[in-house]
Every structure is written in C-alpha cells, then in structure tokens.
Image: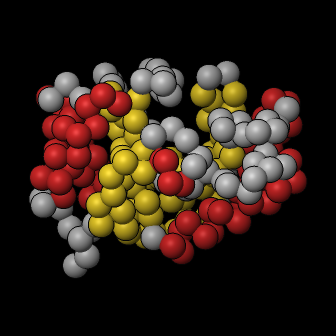
C-alpha cells in the first residue's frame, strides 16, 4: 500500500493535461468548491496527475533527471474514463481515474526508475501507484466538507462515466501549496509530434 504523502518532506512530480480535459474536470470541482466555499480566496487546487513524489531536498537532482528523460519521449497520452471514490488518510476523495495508456506507463516508469536509482523518489512500491486526477478533497480546503457529506458526494459520483483523451502539456515539480507562484519549482514543456 502506498503511504500518505509527507507534505513537509516531499515534492511532487506532476503532469498537466491539455486544456479540454482540465476544463471538463474543473466544472465539477468548481460546483462543489463553490457550494461548500472550500477555498474562500477562490484559488482551487490545479488539476493534475501526480506521477511520483520526491525528497524535497533533492529537487535540483530531480530536475536534471527529468530534463534527460524528456529527451526520450514525445507525446504522453492521458485517458480518463470515470469518476471514482478513493480513500486517503481516512477521508474519501472524488477522483477521475486515469487509464494507464502505453505512453503514460512507459514514461512514468522510466521517470520513477531513474529517480529511485538516484535515491530521490520517496515511493517504495511504485507498482501499486494509481494514476488519478483529484477533483474534490479536503486537503488544502479552508472550509472542509464534513466527512459524511464528502463521502456522500463521492459515492454519488462513483462510476459516472466521462471518457476523455488528451495529451500531457507540461511536466512540473511542485511544492504542496495552492499558491500558484510558490508551487512550481520547475516546469517542462512536453514535446509535440
């Protein structure tokens, strides 16, 4: 089982899908966030796919590895299928499941292997990693949704289908914060065919 992130010790390696996929997922996020006033300052979590977590003290080395890995890959296809309810740290989260496309699987495994060999990745059992886009969670919420209501929302949406295919546009290293200026440590444009 993948252990929960240690926000004070880790940074995140994330893929940003193209705008069409983001806009579709953001519609659901916005409706729930506004109803519960989750983020009074209206800065919502940016929708993304986490592909690895790293020791925050090794971000410079991770940036070098990512620069090299990106030379080996062209497009990374992202395919979402349906909403799902997953449980992290004793709370449900509503996510869009991300299918393991061949390009996503090859890229993420190559990145993880390089980061793990360099002692940078903090994930020990990567074969259990589940790709997803978190739509609703209480992480970073200023006004968290009561747990029973979050569970109800999550279970209501579970299984609803929203198939979309897109390409990843950016690869980034993030700090665990909502602040858009503070969050991004490094950003890489992904190659287009």
Would residue 90 be found to the left or right of residue 38 on screen? left
Quadrant position of residue 70: bottom left
Residue 77 vs residue 188, the one in the foreground: 188
Q: Position of residue 174 (x, y in %)?
A: 42, 45
Residue 100 seen in the figure: no
Residue 41 seen in the figure: yes
Residue 40 vs residue 136, the one in the foreground: 40
Colour mode?
A: secondary structure
The residue drawn where x is 42% and y is 24% is 9
Quadrant position of residue 151: top right
Q: Position of residue 42 (x, y in %)?
A: 74, 57
Vertical position of residue 4 compared to residue 19: above or below:
above
Query: What number of labels is visible?
Result: 0
Vertical position of residue 70 compared to residue 13: above or below:
below
Q: Position of residue 119 (x, y in %)?
A: 19, 25
Residue lying furthest front in this view?
A: 181
Residue 172 vs residue 110, the one in the foreground: 172
Q: Position of residue 160 (x, y in %)?
A: 69, 56
The residue drawn where x is 49% and y is 48% is 182
Would residue 93 be found to the left or right of residue 102 on screen? right
The residue drawn where x is 45% and y is 40% is 175
Q: Quadrant of the N terminus?
A: top left
Would residue 62 be found to the left or right of residue 50 on screen? left
Quadrant position of residue 171: bottom left
Q: Quadrant of the C terminus?
A: bottom left
């Amino acid at each position: 089982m993948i252990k929960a992130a240690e926000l004070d010790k880790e940074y995140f390696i994330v893929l940003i899908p193209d705008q069409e996929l983001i806009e579709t997922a953001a519609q659901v996020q916005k409706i729930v966030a506004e109803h519960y006033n989750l983020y009074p300052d209206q800065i919502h979590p940016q929708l993304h796919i986490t592909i690895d977590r790293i020791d925050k003290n090794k971000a410079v080395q991770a940036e070098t590895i990512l620069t090299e890995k990106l030379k080996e890959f062209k497009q990374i296809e992202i395919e979402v299928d349906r909403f799902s309810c997953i449980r992290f740290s004793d709370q449900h989260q509503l996510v869009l499941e991300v299918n393991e496309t061949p390009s996503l699987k090859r890229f993420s495994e190559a990145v993880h292997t390089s980061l793990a060999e360099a002692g940078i990745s903090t994930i020990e059992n990567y074969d259990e990693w589940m790709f997803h886009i978190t739509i609703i969670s209480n992480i970073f919420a200023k006004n968290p949704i009561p747990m029973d209501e979050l569970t109800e929302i999550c279970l209501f949406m579970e299984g609803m289908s929203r198939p979309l295919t897109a390409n990843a546009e950016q690869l980034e290293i993030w700090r665990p914060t909502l602040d858009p200026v503070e969050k991004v440590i490094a950003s890489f444009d992904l190659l287009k065919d």
